[in-house]
Amino acid sequence: MELIQQLVNGISLGSIYALIALGYTMVYGIVKLINFAHGDVFMVGSFVGFYSMTVLDLGFFPSLILSMVVCALFGVLIERIAYKPLRNATRIAALITAIGVSLFIEYGTIYFRGAQPEAYPGDALPSSTIDIFGVSINSQSLFILGISLLLMIILQFIVHKTKIGKAMRAVSYDTEAAQLMGINVNNTISATFAIGSALAGAAGVIFGAYYIKIEPLMGIIPGLKAFIAAVLGGIGIIPGAMVGGLVLGVIESFVSASGFSLWRDGVAFIVLILILIFRPSGLFGKNTKEKV
């Protein structure tokens, strides 16, 4: 019974990682950039949700939608200002810029609002105990899992059934050929940043409502873990990011339940080391040769 409860908790946590990881993997799949500022977009989304609930007095779902819209616009702004001028630069230049953008967002937030943490309203998510086959499960875990799965399904629909999704897949496969076929590459890249950032914003609101405490540096560890989840599933592969996030969440949950809670963060990096040693292409990736 305890096993099932930990599994549900792990999947709920993993679904948050998966939402953030999707942003990493989508951007990498299009422009081969590891956007290390993505974890801070998650943090911004969490604060937008908090102020929506406390200042604007909105409910959970309106706050979630507002946060997704704000983060989508914020993601496009980051892409246009920081990354677009470096489109033809070396990868290391773009990577250093991503780290700089991350630090700018973190300490810009501290400058404008201070470093003190905030607490989400306790009633942001409905909380009750549900008995399923004799196992008591917190309704918040199921609620988070349901919202995350819904957002992932919507993303799959966008990528596979819409015009912008077709453009994203074309640009990911061959940027120059897509451009020759009349696809606006710059707009497609901006749309990719917008969708990934919107998912990170949603994850920020869900995280804040579930774990209550938020602060300006909260995006660092979840951002790194989401990156590990993307690498675990296969960086650049959308289903891989989903599965990688869920697997990482379950691993963390079982490590904590086993009495090794101090190793909860460390185990993610152990997973990263193992995946890089034994399967660097990730669970869903294929080994491909790259000319350098």
Image (cartoon, rainbow, N blue to C red):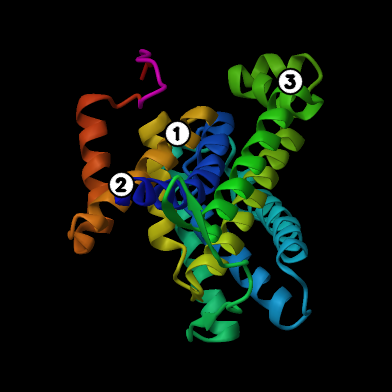
Query: Around disc 2, counting alpha carbons within 10 Å, would you say few (fewer than 14), some (14 to 19), or many (20 or more)?
Result: few
Q: Is residue 110 above or below residue 160?
A: below
At a point 66% along the width and 18% down the height, the residue shown is: 176
Q: CA distance from mark 3 to mark 2?
A: 51 Å
Q: Reading the chain from its start, which is encountered first: label 1 or label 3?
A: 3
- The mark found on residue 1 in the picture is none
Question: Where residue 255 sits in the image (x, y, percent)?
Answer: 23, 52
Question: Where residue 62 sits in the image (x, y, percent)?
Answer: 78, 64
Q: Reading the chain from its start, which is encountered first: label 3 or label 2?
A: 2
Left or right: residue 290 versus residue 251 is right
Q: Which residue is mark 2?
A: 3
Residue sitting nearer the eye, 132 or 199: 132
Q: Tell me where the magenta segment starts and ends, as one range.
A: 282-289
Q: Is residue 184 above or below residue 3?
A: above
Question: Where residue 225 sits in the image (x, y, percent)?
Answer: 38, 50
Q: Is residue 76 above or below residue 272?
A: below
Q: Which residue is mark 1?
A: 243
| Amino acid type at image mark 2 | Leu
Query: Around disc 3, counting alpha carbons within 10 Å, would you say few (fewer than 14), some (14 to 19), or many (20 or more)?
Result: some
Q: CA distance from mark 1 to mark 2?
A: 20 Å
Mark 1 vs mark 3: in front: 1
- The mark found on residue 179 in the picture is 3
Q: Can the viewer see residue 97 in this picture?
A: no
Quarter of the image for residue 159 reads top right
